[in-house]
Image (cartoon, rainbow, N blue to C red):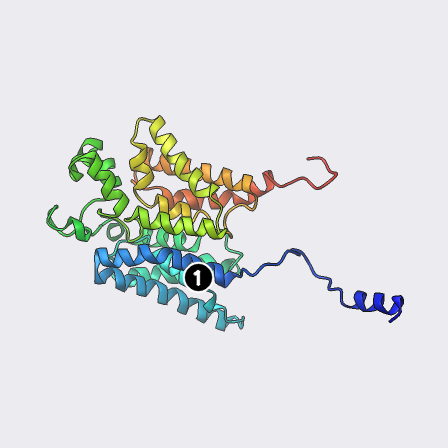
Amino acid sequence: MSIEAKTKIEIDNLMVSASPHIRCDESISKIMWSVNAALAPAALFSIFNFGMPAFINFAVCIVAAVVTEYLILKWQNKPMVIGDGSAFLTGLLLAMNIPATLPWYMPLAGSIFAIAVAKHTMGGLGFNIFNPALIGRAFILASWPIAMTTWPISRDMVGKVDGLTSATPLGILKLQGYEKLVASFGDQATMYKSLFLGERAGSMGETSAILLLLGGIYLIYKGYIKWQVPVIMIGTVGALTAAFGGDPLFHMMSGGLILGAFYMATDMVTIPITTKGQIIFAVGAGALTVLIRLQGGYPEGVCYAILLMNCVTPLIDRLVRPVKYGARR
């Protein structure tokens, strides 16, 4: 074969395409189902902890999210991508952000709102500016505030407290103070142990810190999320609460902070693109969480902190956008 013919064959085999040009074996489906798998131990523990009501609400949230996605894609004549795990993940995360005792129609409405409004009015997967699961939670909280702030006691608390419901640790701190909070657990060491293992009242996904941490570490190991976001967000909460005279360890393990920092603040669609931008995002989310917890009327602030930072993600991307080669900022 002549050199000219060989060169022509090589040129004919070249493929011109738009960036990015780096290819790997990862896919949206693989990443989404890996996140679902990372959340599975904490979800199963929640069902064990709160019983059949938790199972029902998990099922309602997930099925409603997947069916809503299917109906919208069918109506829009778009490719059916419900198997990619993103709608399943939205339903799973929403379920982990609500009390186990909610009547079934409330999580049903929240899941439909999360998929139909927060996700598909923005254009679908990859275009939503807010985390859909958190928007769903905010919708349920605004619509049924009493039900969303009535917390079932965990299996381990049966016989230790009166009734079937109890205030969350953050609720006790907000309304009755730190001494009453510690007394409700017996002593400080028991309080830390209960928070770490999940022996407390709260949303279905905010009980067991250790299982959420293990799932988050798995996602960092796989490279699906960056360690900077959860570590800096949680660290910011600890540092600021200590600066204002609070108990940093309590605040870092309580509420939905670990769930939010590892699984929702790291949402690749709604977080800044660059590492520098993600650090700014994490610091802002942590600071807003502390501000709402310590100065706001609501005992928990993770949901609204992340949603507020979602609002400024485009601005952060613009501020930290890398300079083109050879150009000046």
Residue shown at the point (37%, 56%) measured from the top left:
39
**Residue 212: image x %, image y %?**
35, 50
Depth order, front residue of 49/273: 49
For label 1, the crowd category at 10 Å Cα-Cα, with few meaning under 14, some 14 to 19 and many 20 or more, is: some
Tell me how many marks there are. Answer: 1
**Residue 152: image x %, image y %?**
20, 52
Residue 286 falls in which quadrant of the image? top left
Whether 247 is drawn above or below 298: the answer is above
Whether 134 is drawn above or below 323: the answer is below
Depth order, front residue of 318/219: 219
Q: Name the secondary structure under disc 1.
A: helix
Amino acid type at image mark 1 = Trp
Residue shown at the point (47%, 65%) measured from the top left:
84
- The residue under label 1 is 33
Q: Which quadrant of the rendered structure holds the C terminus?
A: top right
Q: Is residue 70 visible?
A: yes
Q: Which quadrant of the rendered structure holds the N terminus?
A: bottom right
**In this picture, residue 64 sits left or right of residue 201:** right
Residue shown at the point (84%, 68%) measured from the top left:
6
**Residue 149: image x %, image y %?**
25, 48
Single out the residue that lies furthest toward the front.
1
Whether 207 is drawn above or below 189: the answer is below
**In this picture, residue 5 sits left or right of residue 245:** right
